[in-house]
């Protein structure tokens, strides 16, 4: 009986610690998301998001719109577009983003593509040699506010000199849409912090 009590007590303690850790991570993700560096960099690095056959999803379009604004404001000279091909799509995320920005008047010579990645970690890892090869030393990472904390953590660990540039608007506006995205980001952030992936 004493052994069973010890096991139950240990299990409850473990559950409490995990719950507390996830709560702290969730608060960090939520609070970090609104921070904007308000600075300039060599390039905007746009993290990929879903493509609907051959055009950016609304979430991806918001990221592209923000990167285009940074370019037009003179905050960045180039835009690095990340993201590979999903089996159900016709274009890579990077190419769909390129076409969208060209239609918005951003010149092709300002756009650089990383078109192999499938995850946030890969977006940043596969961009690293592209940044070096193009003489890009500093970047503004462009993504949704709730995605920003994890993206910045990964960039820091990879040694990328980055500042946050979260989108000013997001498709995740209501509590109904924000909570699942926050839960997802909390889980992925915990995975990255504790498992490195």
Image (cartoon, rainbow, N blue to C red):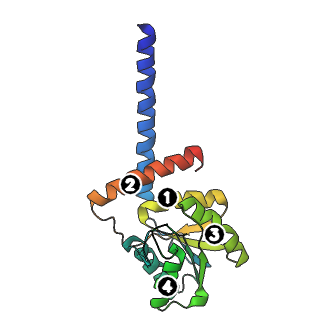
Left or right: residue 6 versus residue 197 is: left
- Quadrant where the N terminus is found in the figure: top left
How far apart in space, not on screen, are marks 3 and 1 (Cα)?
18 Å
Residue name at image x 58 percent, y 59 percent: 121
**Label 2 Cα neighbours within 10 Å, binned few <14 / some 14-19 / many ≥20:** some
The image shows residue 72, relative to residue 196, as above or below, that is: below
Q: Nearer the viewer, mark 4 or mark 3?
A: 4
> Label 3's element?
helix
Left or right: residue 25 versus residue 74 is: left
Residue name at image x 72 percent, y 76 percent: 133
How far apart in space, not on screen, are marks 4 and 1 (Cα)?
28 Å
For the question of whether residue 33 can be seen, the reply is: no
Sequence order check: which comes first, mark 2 or mark 1? 1
Sequence order check: which comes first, mark 3 or mark 1? 3
Q: Which x, y percent locates residue 41?
A: 60, 77
**Label 4 Cα neighbours within 10 Å, binned few <14 / some 14-19 / many ≥20:** some
Which residue is the site of mark 4?
99
Which residue is the site of mark 2?
182
What numbered label is drawn on residue 60? none
How far apart in space, not on screen, are marks 2 and 4 (Cα)?
30 Å
Residue name at image x 40 percent, y 75 percent: 62
> Label 1's element?
helix
Q: Which x, y percent locates residue 106?
A: 51, 89
């Amino acid at each position: 009986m004493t052994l069973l009590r010890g096991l139950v007590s240990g299990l409850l303690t473990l559950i409490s610690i995990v719950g507390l850790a996830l709560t702290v991570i969730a608060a960090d993700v939520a609070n970090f998301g609104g921070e904007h560096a308000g600075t300039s960099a060599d390039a905007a690095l746009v993290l990929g998001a879903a493509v609907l056959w051959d055009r950016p999803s609304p979430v991806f379009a918001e990221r592209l719109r923000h990167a285009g604004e940074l370019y037009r404001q003179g905050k960045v000279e180039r835009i690095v577009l990340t993201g590979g091909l999903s089996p159900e799509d016709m274009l890579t995320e990077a190419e769909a983003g390129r076409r969208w920005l060209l239609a918005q008047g951003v010149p092709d010579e300002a756009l650089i593509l990383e078109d192999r990645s499938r995850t946030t970690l890969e977006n940043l890892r596969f961009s690293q040699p592209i940044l070096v090869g193009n003489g890009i030393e500093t970047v503004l990472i462009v993504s949704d506010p709730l995605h920003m904390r994890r993206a910045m953590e990964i960039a820091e660990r990879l040694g990328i000199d980055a500042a946050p540039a979260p989108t000013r608007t997001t498709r995740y506006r209501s509590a109904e849409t924000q909570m699942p995205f926050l839960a997802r980001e909390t889980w992925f952030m915990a995975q990255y912090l504790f498992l490195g992936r």
